[in-house]
Image (cartoon, coloured by chain):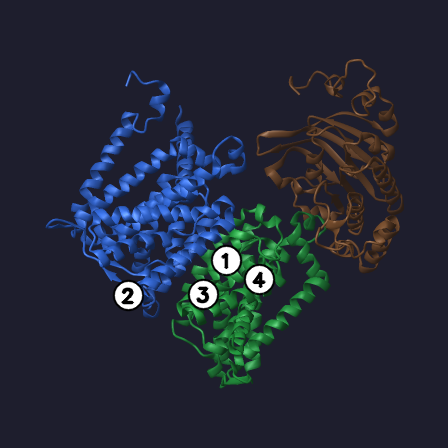
Amino acid sequence: MSDQTATARDIALLGTLARRIRFAVALALLVILPFAVKPFLLDLANQVLLAVIGALALMLLTGFAGLISLGTAGLLGAGAYTVGAMVREFSAPFWVTLPAAAVLGALLGLIFGLPSLRLRGLYLAISTLGLHFIVIYLGGEYEAREALSTGVIIDSPSIGSFSLTSAVGWYFVLLGFAALSLWISVNLQRSRTGRAWRALRDRDVVAGALGIDVQRFKLLAFMVSSTMTAVAGALFAYYRNFVSIDAFSLYLTVQYVAMIIIGGMGSIAGALLGSAFVILFPYAIETVAALLPARFANMVFALNYASFGVVMILFLLLEPAGLMGIGQRIRNSVGTWRSRRSVTERP
Amino acid sequence: MSLQLVANVVVLAAIYALVSTGYVLIYRVSRVLNLAHGELMMIGAYLLVSTAGVFSNEPVIAILLAAVSGLIMGIVVYAVLMRWLTGEAVLAAVLITIALGILLRGLSILVWTSQQFYPAAMFGWKNPSLTILPGVQISAASVAMVCLTILVYVGLFAFLQFTRWGIRMRAAGQNPLLAEQRGIRLHGVYAFAWGLSTFTASLAGMLLSLDSGVEYTMATIGLKAFPAALVGGLDSLLGAVIGSVIVAAAEMIAIQYVNPLLSDVVPFVVLLIVLAIRPWGLFGSREQLDRV
Amino acid sequence: MSEPLLAIDDLEVAYHRAAVALHGVTLRVMPQTIVALVGNNGAGKTTTMRAISGFIGLDDARVTAGQIRFAGQRIENQPPHANTARGIVLVPERDKVFPNLTVTENLAVAASRRATATERRHLEDLVFQFFPALAALRRRLAGLLSGGERQMLAFGSAVVCKPELLLVDELSLGLAPVLVEDLARRLSDIRKELGITVLLVEQNVGAALAIADYGYVLENGRVVLEGSAADLRGRREIQQSYLGQASGEERRSYRALRRTPATERPHG
């Protein structure tokens, strides 16, 4: 460590001893978790890990590069359906379907990204919305043609005689994928590409004048993000052993958008927080719903929608910086409280 | 192409055109895209269900009451929610309307449950199929829809062109800063635009419910009308009419000659084509694009 | 001595809480006079206008110190419609008309509560008297007007608001000198006829001083020179730096001629 320059030490992720200890403790907790909690909570944890991949993908695109996309559900569906179709038609194994989903994701990313070369902001969002509906339609077409009114059933991924069916096993697999996504995100953020994306987000006209190949980086952002999202969709299909196009509605896209807004736009930690929040939220609502009079208790679906809408509105109005913003405020007020205390305690 | 197809296109175009007025009014005046419009239209229809329940013997009162409530609903949405975003980034406002739409969907089920209602039946009205020309049949409610759309458009054109407040609304849409400098209170103008928008949406929703009933999936029609508004240019009423005809025609032709399942996706294919060629729509003002 | 209609004292304005645009500006506008505020680009003229008219919130600017008093009342950091209601009407530098409204509609748009309906109609008639050229263009879309016609319309739509204090931000931009002279004269006529007060911000010093009663010179957010218009016109410094009549000697900037002495901060 003494060979490193001061700057290298500053920007190293785990430079200080304190950070390394915190990382080790977090790692230990993550490893112990599946053995320490009930199966229901383990399933929740798995759902959160799945969501993290998609949330990070959206964070890269919208938070980093500033490119608004409402196509998340379509991409998740595309990834899931690649698995569904390939398993059904060719009984393809996962080491074929997953890369296939990734490739399809990249291709769709290219397509979804093309409008961004001409359109910005609202109009870009609208174009991704249009593409979402087209992807969903194609999935629906497939279901209709194959008379799959209830979707496609998929076997768990297997190698030889070993099949991935246990929740604990899935936990570690998903943790691995989530960690990989995290690693990709962090590295991209700190790389030349990440800086180019930030320049795009802030002022793409200026970025272009500075010699940044705006088109290439926009398409790159879409492709990377879409690949990750499609893979997440594929994993989702395997995890549930089931694919149906109905699951990939606009509401799903909004949930992912909510994840990065509620968590805090432009921040990786925000994406993680937001994923956890949005995934766990419906279960919290269900618990509350059980306490309500029977008439409402039976409409959990509607309660979810309504309360989700309210929470999103509250965050957008009051704390656009999301949970990270709230955390910052708490830290600020604790900080001033501490310094006020130390002042008064001086003899 | 049969006359029946033409008739179907006209009816569908009328629906889209009437719903589009809402998108155009709000966008033109305040540059906000209200993605909760479909849900607001649906609530308008549900309001009729409620008033029809109370005034089942006086349909006129029930309809008027529901329409006025629809107007008030828009003003309330602005006053309580959207006003805080005036002056902020447009995208934040659009995201809030998305969240509002979700909230309204949940709320509508909580208040009115997920069953399907038929206000026409509640009034004891039948909806016969009329033969307006040889070989051409459309429902009575559809005829009413087309008439209402024409009325609304004429009324809106007249209001915006010839009344002082109409001119002020157009001014606020062109240059909000200058409008403020000339004494126009933007909050008032925007609130009224929202009220007018939900008013026409409620009328559309009510008429649709008289034709085919109402349940919580009605909001999708609102979303399908959006491409019609965009194709015409989000800030042009005339564009909304033309856009509606184009989208309705494309949709009906696709259903008839290609595949009925295409009905939900054709509007968005048209949307993408227009976005690729002429993003500001046929009659929209070009500057809008860069402001975003 | 009568009271000034507008009194600004030690006004400081900062953008984004960091970039200071006005470093303590003091000026007085007496009723029914035309006061010119001149200076180069970036001197702080538009910022001053924004502060007075209430449109200071743009670009996250704020009045951080000092006072603006209009008819005795403090008006810093108030919303624009409050100031419009008081009779402070701004003719902006850019986007001064509604491009997709006709000339008549542009005049009809104003929603000032200060004028009764009769007064309104009277004022609209007056506008066409002041600017006869506009009468022939009643149905023309404002966006299709020439630069000079647009400026006339902008004045007209301000007059219809029954202003007490008319703030004009750059009347000469993009206009031929002959037009500028003509417009300036009409502005002076309006002032006389309606008894309003005018604060005119201008890059074209000659045109401004031709109609003004009093003038202030801004440089780098400070008033560096003031005086009656006749005085200023005669000052050699003005002639050299602004009227382009340099005699070949060193061109000087106003750092050398600051009103307040050495108690200044070191760097302008």
- CA gap between label 1 and label 4 equals 30 Å
- CA gap between label 4 and label 2 equals 48 Å
Q: Is residue A177 left or right of residue A197?
A: left
Check the image and report above or below for A173 versus B268: above
Foreground label between 2 and 1: 2
Q: Within 10 angstroms of label 3, few (less than 14), some, or many (20 or more) residues?
A: some
What number is the disc on residue B271? 1
The residue identified by callout 4 is B75
Q: Kindly state the secondary structure of the residue where label 1 is placed.
A: helix
Asked if labels 4 and 3 share a chain, the reply is yes
Chain A shade: blue
Comes first in the chain, label 3 or label 1: 3
Q: Kindly state the secondary structure of the residue where label 3 is placed.
A: helix
Q: Position of residue A185 (x, y in %)?
A: 34, 38
- CA gap between label 2 and label 3 equals 26 Å
- CA gap between label 2 and label 1 equals 29 Å
Mark 4: amino acid: Ile
- Which residue occupies 80% across, 43% down? C148
Q: Is residue B214 left or right of residue A10?
A: right
Q: Nearer the viewer, residue B286 or C172?
A: B286
Q: Chain of mark 1?
A: B
Q: Which chain is green?
A: B
Check the image and report above or below for B224 versus C177: below
The residue identified by callout 3 is B220
